[in-house]
Image (cartoon, rainbow, N blue to C red):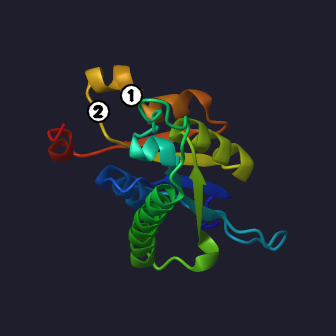
Amino acid sequence: MSEGGNLGCVVVTVDGSEESMQALRWALTNLKLRSPTPDSTEIGFFTILHVQLPTTIATGLNPGPIPFGGPIGLEVPAFSAAIEAHQKRITDAILDHALGICSEFNLTQAKVKTNVVVGDPKEKICEAVEELHADLLVMGSRAIGPIKRIFLGSVSNYCTHHAQCPVIIIKGNEIDNKRS
């Protein structure tokens, strides 16, 4: 019997939270990727997916008009560039942390890829899963309370209903759930 699994592409979402890193550890510990066979050299791989919020959402700012007849829709390029540079540093730190976890499992670069997309996490995760022809999506659950879920929505709930592949949601342990 082969030791490899039949998973070709497993997408694991990371957002910097400990819950997402726990989901990554769970996937690396519990999932078996496709191994090359005499008929095919195709191997399975993990894709670590991070979704950056668009600059306008990340800042929470939409500069309004300047009072008393100032220009409408004024953009400050230096401000936008600074926000984008900050987001890139955050993304790099998140991916470095995730790749550090992967290195603990001695995974080669052929078995781990990274992907960064910009937009609404709910939609972009589902789009990425479809584009990558993922066999499985693994996500952490932040266990936000019911009030926050009403206003913010649950990314994992959305993905379970709209992703084009099976979804596994890894819940944090009881200590983590008490933080909310």
| Chain-order first, disc 2 or disc 1 | 2
x and y percentages locating residue 98 in the rendered image: 42, 67
Quadrant of the drawing holding the C terminus: top left
- As drawn, is 8 to the left or to the right of 114? right
Q: Which residue is mark 2?
A: 144
In this orientation, does residue 7 appear? no
**Do the residues under discs 2 and 1 have CB atoms within 8 angstroms?**
yes
- As drawn, is 60 to the left or to the right of 120? left
Question: Which residue type does callout 2 highlight?
Answer: Ile
> Can you tell which mark lies on residue 105?
none
Mark 1 crowd level (few <14, some 14–19, many ≥20, 10 Å Cα): few
Residue drawn at (40%, 56%), measured in percent from left and top? 26
x and y percentages locating residue 93 in the rendered image: 40, 69
Does residue 82 sit above or below 17 in this rendering? below
Residue drawn at (53%, 36%), measured in percent from left and top? 122
Q: Nearer the viewer, mark 2 or mark 1?
A: 1
